[in-house]
Amino acid sequence: MTQQFNQNRLAQATSPYLQQHKDNPVHWQPWEAAVFEEARRRNVPVLLSVGYAACHWCHVMAHESFEDDDVAALMNAHYVCIKLDREERPDLDDIYMTALSMMGEQGGWPLTMFLDADARPFWGGTYFPKNPQYGRPGFMQILQELSRLYTEEPERIGKNAQTLADGLSVRAKADARGDMPADLPTRAARSLSAHIDNELGGLSGAPKFPQPFLYGFLAKQAQLLGDSAISEAVHFSVERMCAGGLYDHIGGGFARYSVDAEWLVPHFEKMLYDNALLLQLMCQLYRERPSPLLAARIADTIGWVDAEMRLENGALAASLDADTEGEEGLFYVWTPDEIKHVLGGEDGLATRFIDAYGITEAGNFEGRNIPNRLHAKPEDNAEQRDEAALAQARAMLLAHRNQRTKPGRDDKTLADWNGMAIAAIAEAAALFDRDDWRTLAVTAFDAMRDTLATPEGGLAHSARDGQQLDLTLASDLAFASLAACQLAELTGAADYIVAAEAWMALVEAGYKDAQRGGYFANRADTEGVLVRNRPAQDNAAPSANAAILSALSQLTRLTGKPAYQQRGQALFASLSGLLANQYPSMTSLLQAKSDSDYPLSIIIASPHPADAEGDAANALRRAAASHPIIGKSVLLVGSDASLASDHPAFGKQPIGGQTTAYVCPGQICLNPVTTPDALVAMLDDLVRERQNSLNAELSAHNT
């Protein structure tokens, strides 16, 4: 074995997850071509271990196996071992997670895959205990047996590797073009909503993931159909998420998922993208049905992002760990005695908090308590009952909790996740007219762009400590473009549209599948990728092609340029053949299609410069921003700016010196209005027209 590979090489990694493993006795290697050449030279397989910094079971397997000298000796002797951060390389994770599903195994992290020297998988799984338990084979046994098979039965290994590689290739190269049945979005919405648990909220069963893009799709279809049952199911589900332990009632923000069916016990890791997507969903639902509960959850989640996730330069960190001091959830749970100690007993504040948040002596999680509001009646929730006192109690408990050892923070800057979060915060800032949130979004965007900028004008996928990862994914450029479009609406600054157009031009030039349409995850020159996928199915976050379609739709509304709409239509047509059988995992693409099918530009034409827009412009913008109609973009145009010549509102002026709103569905503009009430009435009429038109189409289709 060469000296280079006879050691753990993660000390120079920028990923906090990889840094967690730099002192393992395992000779971990980064993902690079030389590692596979070493495996070929030694004639041993590659062991690929994929995880991320906030992952609890990744920590468990690390403590049990990767920190164990006996296990490490087996790994080093019989394998070349690669440790990979899935958040740095979601493209590679997607390939090998797909291979695992082809083996009939359920996915998850840590992902443990065994590859040949050509990076072809031949066997794999997720978490393995060191010794047999939980009905799982022991990791040491697996290491020994697979090493034996690789040496003694190479034909068998080769056959498995070739079969999986062929399957991955067929999937990646499949022609997914086709015509979507006109009624498929409606059928999909009614089918998916029928699986919502009417007692507990969310899709039936456990564990439960928030899946905000799924509920966003259902909410939009409910509006288009005028279907109150679907709408009610979505609102109820999100209210249960907001009441349960999935939400951190003390510090704000949502955990990754709930391990039970009641939303009570979370898997305690907190991810930036989950919170970003939930913010967007809550804003959408708040516009439909304003409530103190949603307003509080939106405000406190943004407060958590600002307090816990904002880096020194203003960009946003990736995640907070599930574990503290080696114990899952320790940072977040309480005993009654702790609460009484912090809140005192003289004025009854501790008693009120204990009663309101379901605190018991027995506890609801390993003898301690996860504060929650699941037991409260709808008319007696924390936003309506004794809120001032409970807010005081939460602030006191948060101050005390912050003295505990905090969960580790993965402080790398990810382009796609920052894009999602910035877009969500900007949307909330417009909805609630919050200057502080606007500043947070603008600052984070500037920091993201500065930190991740590449020489060709793109964005690196990840950076930390001044070092960029040499990788740009299509999803990075798409989600950053969505953030730029949202900031253009929020601020009226044309520079954001210029940035979005430039990034989407890079997507077109570097990621388009010229033969079949749609867009690849990677550029063609990305090294070490077994297959080039066109992501259409949602995973933890919306698919890259869904994000691209959303960005193209927003640019269509903001610029009026028909080329963006044409690109979006071509993208959807290239993937719509998958929808008939795979729509449950493609709801973000269907959601983006709804927005693109109902483009609506609302232009606020002011007689004043943008930086002196005045109360009239603000009132019209607030009315537009708070209306629930889907597919809209709202843009202020001051006297110091103008729209692109392709825009349907190009040349439209304030009427009689008054700030004027132009509502433009598609390429036409309706009669101008100058008051918020008239604007709201016009948008209400459009919602009804859409409902009548769609239901008439469906009726004709069914007959």
Image (cartoon, rainbow, N blue to C red):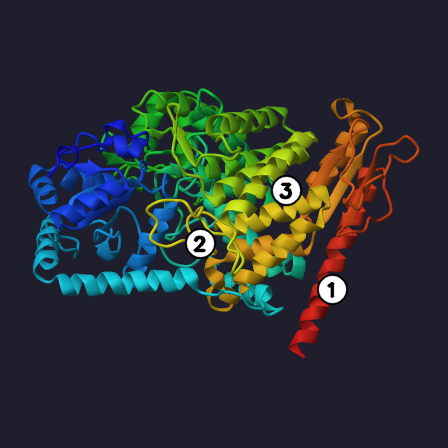
Quick check: 102 left or right of 153?
Answer: right
Q: Quadrant of the C terminus?
A: bottom right
Q: Amino acid at mark 1?
A: Ser
Q: Which residue is mark 1?
A: 693
Q: Which residue is mark 3?
A: 290
Q: CA distance from mark 1 to mark 2?
A: 34 Å
Q: Measuring 46% from the left and 64% from the top, which residue is drawn there?
A: 582
The answer to whether one can see residue 469 in this image is yes
Q: Which residue is mark 2?
A: 200
Quick check: 664 left or right of 268?
Answer: right
Looking at the image, is mark 3 or mark 1 nearer the viewer? 1
Q: Secondary structure at mark 2?
A: loop
The answer to whether one can see residue 234 in this image is no
40 or 50, nearer to the observer: 40
365 or 329, nearer to the observer: 329
Q: Amino acid at mark 2?
A: Leu
Tag 1–tag 2 contact (CB < 8 Å): no
Q: Amino acid at mark 3?
A: Pro
Q: Measuring 93% from the left and 33% from the top, which residue is drawn there?
A: 656
**Rendered location of residue 129, percent (x, y):** 15, 48
Tag 3–tag 1 contact (CB < 8 Å): no
**Rendered location of residue 575, percent (x, y):** 52, 61
Disc 2 crowd, CA 10 A, few/some/many (<14, 14-19, 20+): some
